[in-house]
Image: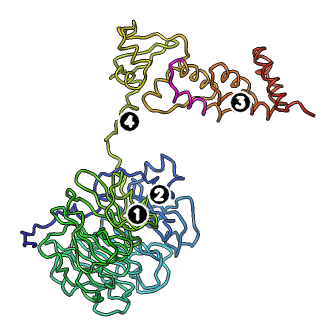
């Protein structure tokens, strides 16, 4: 039995997507559409969103508040002023310098975007007036949505399939667009061409969050109550029946709990309470309610009751996928996951709910805009990389070719068996503050030490030969493979025989085979290079014998 608690007003920040207000570092490369962007471009992103019927469109906002779009451009959803697709990001000059605080997309798709000064912009598909401009003409570029919103400050937006909602700073809810099932909440099923305030039961309520299913709408008010309206054929309004609702109606099934977050999938809904309890209702064809079966639920039912406190739930109107995150950081997923129906919450290895949608949702859209907050925090790997060759923190230095390289004994011992032995087995070097190195060049040894801090090697193929020698001497097999990879990528007619000689000398069989085949394939050119005639006689004889067995000298 649910008792009536004292309903505290939910903290506003907990209702905003953490990706908008928190400091979540998200790897957007999990979404293939971002894979062509380089590190510099990715580092400039403040907010990003992947959308579209096949997740083939994306929008992102840079740190200097410029809005960029790229992708397929269905229904002019990129807002570039034309219908052309683009694989290269294009800037939307009309939105230049405007700080985006909320962003949502429909199925057309159409886009809604709110800025920090409360302005609302829209573009894309407009067959049902979901852009709110009073017409059904496609929105090829962003336009300000101002009808009935003058002197109103929009703080949050939400899109259904073809209808739109906006929330103002005074807690008012506005809706417009497709209304065949009452999802606009106007009391009729006539499409709504411009924003109209949703009143009825919400008239004297202060809404703090809004979400849309495909053809349904939900609002959360400041005392933790949830109201729903629109299509209810699968019970997605949670009212205990499956009749459509033309005006907002309170979910009595959640009476006695204080809801802090609501999300909607295609035809199901999830609610998270201030006690960390999770409720689900609506369509369940793919197990998206997480109840262990595929039966629809007309009223909210609690799921994951035996698990620890839930701190976040995730769903979006484009998918039948659900996800949740616990207080300890565990992420669960259920529903339609890569074509499979997962009827019970499944524990994943993901660190955030966003990854569930990147890897398992169909389509792999984002359930909320992601924020890449580039603050001063450094990961362990980043901190190590920064401290390499830093004389201020180093406790040891190597002298190579008269130049110093500053390092840290602890890092070297952790990362390399050679140094672990050196500093723990009473070698002479263990007592020295400066260690002289004379068997390797400065570029080679510095690259080796830098590799221990970064896992990366940046050397031309000729120097990589020396590093290959070092890796062989120090029994660093991974470094040895990296060197071979660098050499393979840098092989040319001029250096091929020198590289072959090095591969033989350092017992790198794969590299030796690669260089040998290259030399045979370019035999005429290779035999005219200086490196070919300067090579050791025995190696030259061996090469000629092997090449002849391969038929290299046949007419």
Residue furthest top as drawn: 428
Q: Residues within 10 Å of mark 3 (few under 14, many from 20)?
A: many
Which residue position holds label 1? 366
Which residue position holds label 2? 31
The tag earlier along the polypeptide, 4 or 1, is: 1
Between the residue at mark 2 and the residue at mark 1, the CA separation in whole angstroms equals 9 Å
Q: Which element type, helix, strand or loop, lies under badge 2?
A: loop
Tell me where residue 68 appears, x and y as whole percent.
Answer: 47, 61
Which residue position holds label 4? 381
Task: Locate residue 345: give its quadrant.
Answer: bottom left
Would you say 481 lies left or right of 545 here? left
Point out the stretch of residues depicted in magenta: 473-485
Residue furthest front as drawn: 293
Q: Residues within 10 Å of mark 4 (few under 14, many from 20)?
A: few
Q: Which element type, helix, strand or loop, lies under badge 4?
A: helix
The tag earlier along the polypeptide, 3 or 2, is: 2
Which residue position holds label 3? 515
Q: Does 456 appear above or below 265?
A: above
């Amino acid at each position: 039995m649910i008792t009536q608690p004292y309903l505290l007003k939910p903290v506003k920040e907990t209702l905003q997507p953490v990706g908008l207000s928190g400091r979540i570092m998200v790897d957007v490369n999990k979404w293939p559409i971002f894979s062509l962007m380089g590190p510099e471009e990715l580092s400039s992103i403040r907010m990003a969103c992947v959308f579209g019927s096949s997740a083939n469109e994306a929008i992102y906002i840079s740190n200097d508040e410029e809005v960029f779009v790229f992708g397929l451009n269905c229904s002019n959803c990129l807002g570039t002023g034309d219908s052309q697709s683009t694989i290269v990001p294009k800037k939307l000059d009309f939105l230049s310098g405007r700080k985006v605080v909320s962003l949502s997309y429909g199925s057309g798709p159409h886009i809604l975007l709110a800025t920090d000064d409360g302005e609302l912009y829209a573009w894309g598909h407009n067959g049902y007036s979901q852009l709110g401009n009073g017409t059904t003409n496609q929105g090829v570029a962003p336009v300000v949505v101002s009808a009935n919103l003058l002197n109103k400050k929009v703080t949050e937006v939400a899109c259904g399939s073809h209808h739109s909602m906006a929330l103002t700073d005074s807690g008012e809810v506005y809706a417009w667009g497709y209304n065949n099932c009452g999802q606009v909440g106007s009391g009729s099923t006539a499409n709504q061409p411009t924003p109209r305030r949703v009143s009825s039961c919400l008239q004297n309520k202060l809404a703090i969050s809004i979400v849309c299913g495909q053809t349904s709408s939900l609002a959360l008010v400041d005392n933790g109550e949830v109201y729903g309206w629109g299509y209810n054929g699968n019970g997605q309004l949670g009212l205990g029946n499956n009749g459509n609702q033309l005006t907002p109606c309170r979910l009595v099934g959640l009476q006695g709990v204080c809801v802090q977050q609501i999300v909607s999938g295609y035809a199901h809904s999830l609610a998270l309470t201030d006690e960390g309890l999770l409720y689900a209702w609506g369509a369940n064809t793919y197990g998206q309610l997480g109840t262990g079966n595929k039966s629809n639920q007309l009223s909210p039912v609690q799921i994951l009751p035996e698990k620890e406190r839930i701190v976040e739930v995730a769903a979006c109107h484009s998918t039948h996928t659900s996800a949740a995150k616990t207080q300890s950081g565990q992420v669960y997923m259920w529903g339609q996951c890569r074509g499979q129906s997962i009827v019970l919450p499944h524990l994943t290895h993901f660190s955030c709910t966003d990854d569930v949608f990147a890897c398992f949702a169909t389509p792999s859209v984002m359930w909320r805009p992601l924020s890449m907050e580039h603050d001063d925090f450094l990961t362990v790997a980043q901190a190590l990389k920064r401290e390499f060759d830093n004389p201020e923190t180093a406790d040891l230095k190597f002298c190579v070719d008269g130049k110093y390289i500053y390092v840290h004994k602890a890092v070297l011992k952790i990362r390399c068996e050679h140094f672990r032995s050196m500093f723990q087995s009473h070698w002479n070097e263990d007592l020295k503050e400066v260690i002289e190195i004379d068997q390797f060049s400065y570029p080679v040894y510095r690259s080796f030490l830098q590799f221990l801090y970064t896992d990366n090697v940046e050397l031309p193929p000729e120097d990589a030969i020396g590093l290959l020698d070092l890796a062989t001497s120090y029994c660093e097999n991974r470094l040895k493979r990296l060197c071979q990879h660098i050499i393979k990528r840098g092989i040319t007619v001029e250096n091929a025989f020198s590289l072959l000689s090095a591969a033989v000398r350092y017992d790198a069989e794969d590299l030796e085979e690669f260089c040998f085949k290259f030399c045979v394939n370019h035999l005429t050119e290779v035999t005219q290079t200086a490196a070919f005639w300067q090579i050791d006689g025995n190696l030259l004889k061996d090469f000629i014998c092997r090449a002849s067995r391969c038929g290299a000298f046949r007419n």
